[in-house]
C-alpha cells in the first residue's frame, strides 16, 4: 500500500488503521495511568508508536503532502569522470 497506488481499498484501510491506532494508544495510556506506570519513557514510547504508524497512512490518504521528486532535465552524465 503506497501513496500513489490505485487500490480502491487503500484509503479505507488507512482510515481504519489511523482510527484503531489512536484508540489503542489512548487505551494503553489510560491502562498504564490506572496502574501508576505511565512515566516519561512510556509516554515517549507511545508517541513513537504514533509517529511510526500514522504518518505513512496519512500519506496514503493525502498524497499531495509528500514532497515532489525533482528530476533534472539536463543530459549530463551523473557518473564522475575523475578516476
Image (cartoon, helix red, strand yellow):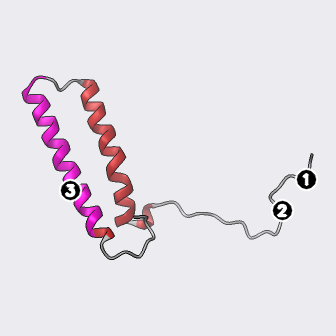
Chief SS of the magenta region = helix
* Circle 2 crowding by C-alpha within 10 Å: few under 14, some 14–19, many from 20: few
Q: Residues within 10 Å of mark 3 (few under 14, many from 20)?
A: few
Residue appearing at x 63%, y 64% in the figure: 70
Residue 53 located left or right of residue 75: left
Q: Where is residue 37 drawn, in percent x and y? A: 15, 23
- Which region is colored magenta? 12-36
Q: Quadrant of the N terminus?
A: bottom left
User: Label 3's element?
Assistant: helix
Residue found 82% across the figure and 69% down from its top: 75
Which residue lies at the image location 39% right of the left edge and 61% below the top edge? 59
Circle 2 is placed at which residue position?
77
Q: Please report contact status of discs 1 and 2: CB closer than 8 Å, yes or no.
A: yes
- Residue 47, given in percent of the width and then of the height, sits at 29, 38
| Numbered mark located on residue 56 in the image | none
> Residue 4 location in percent, x, y?
45, 70
Gap between marks 1 and 2 measured at Cα: 9 Å
Query: How far apart are labels 2 and 3 at the CA level?
Result: 47 Å
Count of numbered badges drawn on the protein: 3
Mark 1 and mark 3: span between their CA atoms?
Answer: 52 Å
Q: Which residue is mark 3?
A: 19
Residue 11, magenta (yes or no): no
Q: Position of residue 63 (x, y in %)?
A: 42, 66
Q: Label 1's element?
A: loop
Q: Quadrant of residue 48?
A: top left
Above or below, 59 relative to 4: above
Which mark is on residue 81? Answer: 1
- 2 in relation to 44, above or below: below
Q: Residue at x 30, y 44 (%)?
A: 50
Amino acid at each position: 500500500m503506497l501513496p500513489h497506488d490505485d487500490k480502491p481499498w487503500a484509503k479505507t484501510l488507512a482510515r481504519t488503521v489511523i482510527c484503531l491506532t489512536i484508540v489503542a494508544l489512548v487505551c494503553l495510556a489510560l491502562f498504564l495511568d490506572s496502574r501508576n506506570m505511565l512515566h516519561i519513557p512510556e509516554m515517549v514510547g507511545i508517541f513513537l508508536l504514533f509517529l511510526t504508524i500514522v504518518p505513512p497512512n496519512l500519506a496514503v490518504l493525502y498524497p499531495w503532502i509528500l514532497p515532489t521528486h525533482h528530476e533534472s532535465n539536463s543530459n549530463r552524465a551523473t557518473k564522475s569522470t575523475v578516476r
